[in-house]
Image: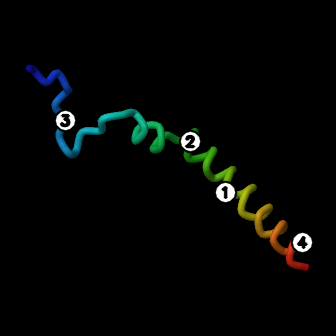
Amino acid sequence: MTDDAPVTTENEPTTDFEKAHASEPFQRLKATQRGFVFPLGIAFLLWYFA
């Protein structure tokens, strides 16, 4: 029985997730998300506990 799985090393990415995560558009998207979600979450918690 043969193993047809590709041979990879530790430094070689097996998916494009690392490449997508390092891209400039993705970094801008995450910054926009953090800039919206965290302040809104804090505002909600202040409203809820007040």
Element class at badge 3: loop
On the image, numbered disc 2 is attached to which residue? Answer: 26
For disc 2, the neighbor class at 10 Å (few under 14, some 14 to 19, many from 20) is: few
For disc 3, the neighbor class at 10 Å (few under 14, some 14 to 19, many from 20) is: few
Q: CA distance from mark 3 to mark 4?
A: 51 Å
On the image, numbered disc 3 is attached to which residue? Answer: 8
Viewport quadrant of the C terminus: bottom right
Residue at position x 84%, y 66% in the image: 44
Q: CA distance from mark 4 to mark 2?
A: 31 Å
Query: What label does residue 47 carry, if any?
Result: 4
- The answer to whether 13 appears left or right of 8 in the picture is right
Earlier residue among tags 1 and 3: 3
Element class at badge 4: helix
Identity of the residue furthest to the left in this view:
1
Give the residue type at disc 2: Phe
Residue at position x 43%, y 38% in the image: 17
Viewport quadrant of the N terminus: top left
Identity of the residue furthest to the front in this view:
1
On the image, numbered disc 1 is attached to which residue? Answer: 34
Residue at position x 45%, y 44% in the image: 22
